[in-house]
């Protein structure tokens, strides 16, 4: 099977094993990324994720360019930033760059917290809810809102991607023959 996603065939098999018909696992991961309160059951789900599952989540949420990706499948968290620069002055782009940097710092923080099972106490923790604090409107408010909205889009898209990949049924040779016969009869 030709690779058409950022995941290898082995990683797709792993995603199916972990997440197929288990949307509740994706929802618990999603809540952790939004720093929402978790039920005891959701905490147990997150604790049950093994190293392979956490590595897969890391790859999907925080993709990195490592030279192993197929052509046209290479991307990282900075790749989407060019659309923000279209028809903008350089000084305006700086706010988008800072917003993207905050998004990256936040996602890396959340993946690390998911892996360790607790907040990182060595660095100042980025809080999702504080990104919408608009009591004082300034440059930081704009940067926070850029980051927050991009975080929501990214988490929703990437976790939906995992759910779709996990639920995708592999077609057997017999299924392919049946489908082709049905299509040719039309």
Image (cartoon, rainbow, N blue to C red):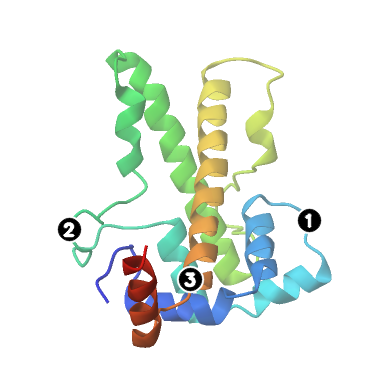
Q: Earlier in the sequence, mark 3 or mark 1?
A: 1
| Label 2 vs label 1, nearer the camera | 2
- Looking at the image, which is closer to me, 68 or 5? 5
Q: Position of residue 72 (x, y in %)?
A: 21, 53
Quarter of the image that includes the C terminus: bottom left
Q: Left or right: where does residue 125 sit relative to residue 147?
A: right
Secondary structure beneath disc 3? Answer: loop
Residues at discs 2 and 1 in contact (Cβ within 8 Å) = no
Q: Residues within 10 Å of mark 1 (few under 14, many from 20)?
A: few
* Residue position for label 3: 168
Q: Left or right: where does residue 27 sit relative to residue 81?
A: right
* Residue position for label 1: 37
| Label 3 vs label 1, nearer the camera | 3
Secondary structure beneath disc 2? Answer: loop
Residue 10 in view, yes or no: no
The residue at 64%/57% (across/down) is 30
Q: Left or right: where does residue 30 sit relative to residue 183?
A: right
The residue at 78%/56% (across/down) is 37
Mark count = 3
Q: Residues within 10 Å of mark 2 (few under 14, many from 20)?
A: few
Q: Left or right: where does residue 24 sit relative to residue 116?
A: right
Cα gap from disc 3 to disc 1, whole angstroms: 30 Å
Q: Position of residue 119 (x, y in %)?
A: 64, 59
The answer to whether 95 is drawn above or below residue 113 in the figure is above
* Residue position for label 2: 71
């Amino acid at each position: 099977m030709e690779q058409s996603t950022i995941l290898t065939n082995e990683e797709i098999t792993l995603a199916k094993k972990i997440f197929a018909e288990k949307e509740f696992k994706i929802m618990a991961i999603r809540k952790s990324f939004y720093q929402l309160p978790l039920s005891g059951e959701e905490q147990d789900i997150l604790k049950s994720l093994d190293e392979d599952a956490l590595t897969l989540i890391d790859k999907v949420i925080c993709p990195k360019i490592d030279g192993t990706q197929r052509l046209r499948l290479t991307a990282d968290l900075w790749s989407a930033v060019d659309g923000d620069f279209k028809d903008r002055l350089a000084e305006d782009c700086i706010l988008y760059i800072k917003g993207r940097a905050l998004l990256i710092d936040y996602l890396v923080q959340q993946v690390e917290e998911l892996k360790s099972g607790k907040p990182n106490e060595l660095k100042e923790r980025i809080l999702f809810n504080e990104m919408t604090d608009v009591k004082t409107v300034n440059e930081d408010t704009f940067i926070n809102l850029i980051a927050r909205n991009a975080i929501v889009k990214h988490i929703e898209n990437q976790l939906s991607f995992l759910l779709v990949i996990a639920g995708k049924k592999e077609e057997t040779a017999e299924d392919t023959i049946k489908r082709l016969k049905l299509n040719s009869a039309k």
